Image: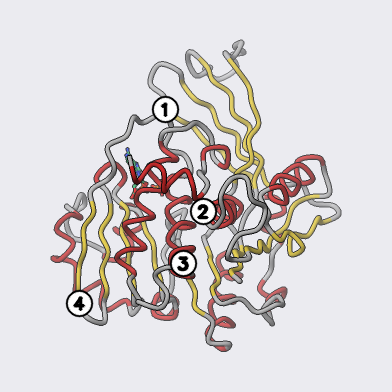
Amino acid sequence: LMTVIGSLNMDLITCTSRVPAAGETLISQSFDTGSGGKGANQAVACARLSRIKSHQTGNVTVRLVGAVGNDNFGHDLVQGLYGDGIDTSGVQAKAGERTGAAVIIVEQQTGENRILISPNANFSLRPSDFTNLPAPLPDLIILQLEIPLDTTLQIIRIAGEHRIDVLLNPAPAQELPNWAYAAVKHLIVNESEAAIITNPKDKNPDWTKAGEHFNSIVALGAQHVIITLGARGVIYLETRQKKLWQFDAKNVEVVDTTAAGDTFVGAYAVAVMTFAKGKEDFAAAVKWANAAAAKTVERRGAQAAIPWLDEVEAYEAE
Ligand code: ADP
């Protein structure tokens, strides 16, 4: 069993030829809604990447713990997750709260996004809700930073007391107390998050030379540290044995990079729980997650773009 504890958001996406000025009203090119939120996206990635598209049950059970409002958005989000075979019994519909929402304005010509997130019900998760871990106890807990930071820290603390492995994806980037990094087994960061954990003097470091930052990363205390580099692929550091791997990104046609990072996290988590487990072959897990994330880049949307297991394997064989 793997449990993701994190956010659910309804994405409200509108495309425009240009962004309106203050006080101006424009007709947009399109409007659409989509299921998102890093917690929900990562749960979807875990669920889809552990089963083939035509099958409901996979070889791992995926549970999502979080909160939505008692409204239509919340209902629709949970329905979608349930359809992906996720155990949603830990997602509370909270009276008096609204479901988390992300307003996304896409400027057509440049493809540039402007995003405003309203955490809403996601921020109603308090540390006092996690004085104990939600039952049943999982083998792996997956966390991001779209719920209150003190709640995330409490979950890391209590997971440690139960000796349950934690995978932390500290996104959106925020600084954490040192003990928290040391308490997680798997740490997956992108470039801006990597800058926070290594505090480089160089403001624009070359992560492909991650060896230069090895000592500061080892000092964090997390055993497996993965730095995703977008179109430049990924770096994996095993800090106990001081080993480093680097994988180039798959050469794909980029349509929309939304949820690439979330797909990477979900794919890696599934690999850790399945084929990488006995052999402790986490480099193989990273390599596979790199292929799965590339698949997401080829499609538009957040959860809509996340592939199933058979889509990645087929892709790998191409
Ligand atoms: P985030 O979206 O969290 O900032 P990244 O941009 O680092 O994360 O992307 C996460 C992973 O997604 C990368 O390590 C890579 O595996 C894959 N990926 C992202 N962008 C591309 C791309 N242009 N081509 C191929 N793979 C990509």
User: Is residue 316 toward the left or the right of residue 237 in the image?
Assistant: right
> Which label is found at residue 168?
3
Residue at x-position 79% and y-position 45%: 75
Q: Which of marks 1 and 4 is nearer the N terminus?
A: 1
Q: Nearer the viewer, mark 3 or mark 1?
A: 3
Q: Where is residue 157 in the image (x, y as percent from the top left)?
A: 55, 82
Q: Nearer the viewer, mark 4 or mark 2?
A: 2
Residue named by callout 4: 242
> Which label is found at residue 112?
1
Task: Point out the image quarter for the C terminus.
Answer: top left
Cα distance in 3D space between marks 1 and 4: 39 Å
Residue at x-position 52% and y-position 61%: 144
What element does badge 1 sit on? loop
Q: Earlier in the sequence, mark 2 or mark 3?
A: 2
Q: Where is residue 166 in the image (x, y as percent from the top left)?
A: 49, 74
User: Is residue 70 toward the left or the right of residue 37 in the image?
Assistant: right
User: Is residue 286 toward the left or the right of residue 65 in the image?
Assistant: left
279 up-or-down from 234: above or below: below
Q: Which of marks 1 and 4 is in front?
A: 4
Cα distance in 3D space between marks 3 and 1: 28 Å
Q: Where is residue 241 in the image (x, y as percent from the top left)?
A: 22, 81
Residue at x-position 47% and y-position 43%: 311
Q: Which of marks 2 and 3 is in front?
A: 2
